[in-house]
Amino acid sequence: MLFPVLLASASCGWFEKNEREGDPIVAEVNGKYLYQSDIAEMGAKGLTPADSAEVIKNFVDAWVKKQLILGKAEEYLSPEQLDIEKRVQDYRESLIIYHYENELIKQKMDTLVGDNEVIAYFEQYKENFLLTEDIAQFYYVKLPKDAPKLDDARRMFRSDKTEDKEMLKEHCMQYAADFYLQDSIWYELSGIYKQIPIDQLQLRTLSKNKLSGEVEDSLYIYLLKVNDFREQQQPAPLNYIKEDVAKIILNKRKMELINTTYENLYKDAVENGDFKQY
């Protein structure tokens, strides 16, 4: 026995014989029993009798309080709320199916989406890809007003020469407070309007006329060239949502694979007589 001294001394009022022969009852609440063997499973080896008594008392008190709370909860909850076993079973089944579907996808689904497939899907469902905010492709350089060689920066910014673009990048690394020099990337303008003192009309004018522009505030000069501009509710450019389209295609593949697998499973079961309906 794990706690011989304590259990023997407490036997006068704590333990009673019950249907689990040789396993005395330690406590009872609302017809639920805590047994000596339940306490023995605590494994409190190496403790003094006094420490063991304290550990066991705390354990029993906690058990009693828990059963009292459960009893009160059962009085208040509806039969549907108390049907824990059904909910646990439903959750278990859902979890098993979820893991099965994941393994099915890993083993049998092609996860590569080609550019042609993306383009075809986009062209077919273009009306589903309307912009929710303004976006633009642009060059942008933010320079302190006291930065050196501002005129050189302006000249390099307006130039289309490869060497000037490389020199501008080096200049920005040294002196710019911020800059974007990739004209193939689309940027959401909700954040840009907060960084650059420019409005939608100015951006649209620069984009329409393919011009470089310059605005300023009290501390900075902003060099800007808009290569393309799209307003919200216009169709999104493909290179802006390409990853989203690929994800949609993959998700459709997943659903088709899962649905086809389940349909074939049902069809085979019918042919093989694997189930009966009454």
Image (cartoon, rainbow, N blue to C red):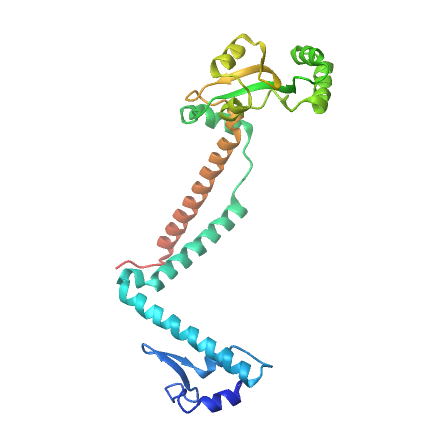
| Residue furthest out toward the top | 209
In the rendered image, the quadrant that contains the C terminus is bottom left
Q: Quadrant of residue 155?
A: top right
- In the displayed structure, does residue 134 sit left or right of residue 196? left
At x 48%, y 79%, the residue is 56
Position of residue 25 relative to residue 241, above or below, is below
Residue 182 place in picture, x, y as percent:
62, 22
At x 42%, y 74%, the residue is 63
Residue 199 place in picture, x, y as percent:
49, 16
Residue 23 place in picture, x, y as percent:
43, 86
Position of residue 7 relative to residue 99, above or below, is below
Q: Nearer the viewer, residue 168 or 175?
A: 175
Residue 202 place in picture, x, y as percent:
50, 12
Q: Nearer the viewer, residue 86 or 264?
A: 86
Q: Nearer the viewer, residue 208 or 76?
A: 76
Q: Quadrant of residue 83?
A: bottom left
Position of residue 34 relative to residue 79, above or below, is below
